[in-house]
Image (tube, rainbow, N blue to C red):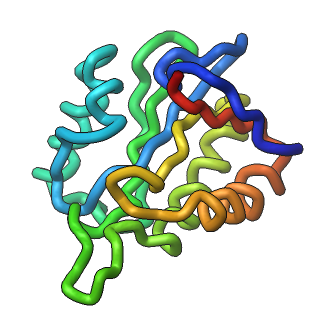
Amino acid sequence: MKIELIKGDATKPQVEGNKIITHICNDIGGWGKGFVLAISKRWKTPENEYRNWFKSDKNFNLGEIQMVQVEKDLWVCNMIGQHKTISNSNGIPPIRYEAVEKCLEKLSDESLRLNASIHMPRIGCGLAGGKWEEIETIIERTLLKNNLEVYVYDFN
């Protein structure tokens, strides 16, 4: 299996069957910049569930995921893979690759359980400051090794 690159909108998966749209969230309960805005424009539930999860403090940690069903055959996976929202004083960006890997391992289990393909923008490479080469390697180690269909969208 390999990552399928698609030009288009990751909030509008272009395949049949069950689908999971995944993206990276921060560990401080902030939702308001980047890809989350596109998600909130289409569905209110993922943001509401994320905010409720943060308030509940129940397992709201780096490396955790939250699955939110938004349509009959479509889920959004909120993955906590970013520490805070800005680089620290040493210039270390918010992305936490170890947390992303834990999230993608959990997502892999969910995808297998739901028999769902996985759809995403280039996660972790925008506001989180990550490098696609790192993320791609993590995707290969977690999702592709389980023969999951992975689609990465580059917005036109």
Q: Quadrant of residue 69?
A: top left
Image quarter in which the N terminus is found: top right
Q: Is residue 105 visible?
A: no
Q: Position of residue 5 (x, y in %)?
A: 71, 34
Q: Position of residue 57 (x, y in %)?
A: 17, 59
Q: Residue at x 36, y 59 (%)?
A: 128
State the residue lying farthest toward the bottom: 90
Q: Position of residue 39 (x, y in %)?
A: 34, 26
Query: Height in image: 127 above or below 67?
Result: below
Q: Residue at x 57, y 65 (%)?
A: 101
Q: Nearer the viewer, residue 36 or 52?
A: 36
Q: Is residue 85 left or right of residue 43?
A: left
State the residue lying farthest toward the left: 55
Q: Is residue 138 left or right of residue 65?
A: right
Q: Is residue 132 left or right of residue 27?
A: right
Q: Is residue 28 visible?
A: yes
State the residue lying farthest toward the right: 1
Query: In this figure, what is the number of numbered marks?
Result: 0
Q: Position of residue 154 (x, y in %)?
A: 57, 32
Q: Residue at x 52, y 38 (%)?
A: 121
Q: Quadrant of residue 115?
A: top right
Q: Nearer the viewer, residue 57 or 21?
A: 21
Q: Is residue 22 left or right of residue 61?
A: right
Q: Residue at x 18, y 39 (%)?
A: 32
Q: Nearer the viewer, residue 113 or 7?
A: 7
